[in-house]
Amino acid sequence: MLVRRLTATLIAALCVTALAIQLYIAVEYAHPSGHSVGGAILNYFSYFTILTNLAIATALVATAANASDARIWNRPSANTALAVYIIVVATVYAALLRHLYAPSGIEFLAERTLHFVVPALFAGYWILLVPKGTLRLKDQLPWLLPPAAFFVWTLVHGALTGFYPYPFLNVAERGYPSVLWSGLLFSALFLALGTVLIIVDWLLGSLQSRWQGEIPTA
């Protein structure tokens, strides 16, 4: 438990630092880019990357502090859902978004931390420190609700403000049929990755049970 809490502290610290840097940059460049500070902050929280890293930071801070709500965040299902989300973040960024923007300096470090460092560390955290062997395939159905809510919010927010966080969700440029098709493809990606992680959970849970059965008891 101590190792898990220390690891959670490290990852949470990196995550919160990168999130704070990105928020500062969003506010700093609000007026030059033609946005109000409030609008810039709203747009900042309209990125799936930001929301996912924020959820991971919240979960890990609760775990590190052994808070009263840590029991909820410590559930294998909750941690696996977060692992699915953050792996999707890293995959989509590397495949579709990385070439669209070239940050530099501290912004580069924050960008890479949120899209690559935190995903890699949290994936390792999930593999090594989250209990295994309790998940079922049906557990992943509720995992689709946050991405679905994000998708609906993006369409509503975009229709009202003209801001779309990602080009493949930009209704103004691509139209609703293309964006809805993108939503279906991402739903399939979430389901496929969720299924893979559940199978990994089964395999690791089986190995853990076998190892424990081989440990001699006095």
Image (cartoon, rainbow, N blue to C red):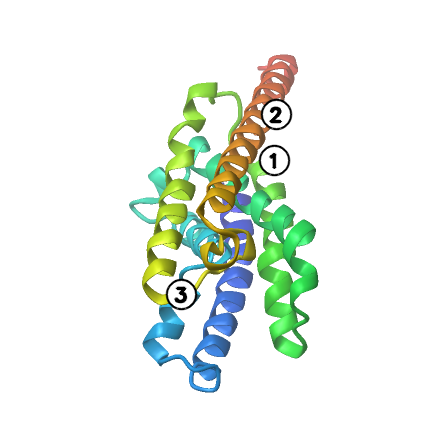
Q: How far, Cα to Cα, is label 3 from label 2?
A: 41 Å
What crowding class fits label 2: few (fewer than 14 Cα within 10 Å), some (14-19), or many (20 or more)?
some
Residue position marked by numbered label 1 in the rendering = 127
- Residue 189 location (% of width, % of height): 56, 35
Viewer-closest of 213 and 90: 90
Q: How far apart are marks 2 and 1 (CA)?
A: 9 Å
Q: Which of marks 3 and 2 is nearer the N terminus?
A: 3
Tag 3 and tag 1, C-beta contact below 8 Å: no
Check disc 2 and report the residue beneath it. Answer: 200
Circle 2 sits in a helix, a strand or a loop, which is it? Answer: helix
Select label 2 or label 1 by which is in front.
Answer: 2
Question: For the point 55% across and 46% down, which residue is it?
Answer: 86
For image coordinates 61% across by 35% down, the residue present is: 127
Amino acid, disc 3: Gly
Q: Mark 3 points at which residue?
A: 162
State which tag comes first along the sequence, 3 or 1: 1
Q: Furthest-bottom residue in view?
A: 32
Give the CA distance from mark 3 to mark 1: 40 Å
**Residue shown at the point (42%, 35%) measured from the top left:** 144
Residue 136 in view here: no
- Residue 102, by quadrant, is bottom right
Query: Which is nearer the N-term, disc 2 or disc 1?
Result: 1
Judged by depth in the image, the label closer to the viewer, 3 or 2, is 3
Quadrant in the picture for the C terminus: top right
Task: Pick whichever, 63 or 123, lies toward us.
Answer: 123
Q: In which quarter of the image is residue 204?
A: top right
Callouts 2 and 1 close, C-beta under 8 Å: yes
**Can you tell which mark lies on residue 75?**
none
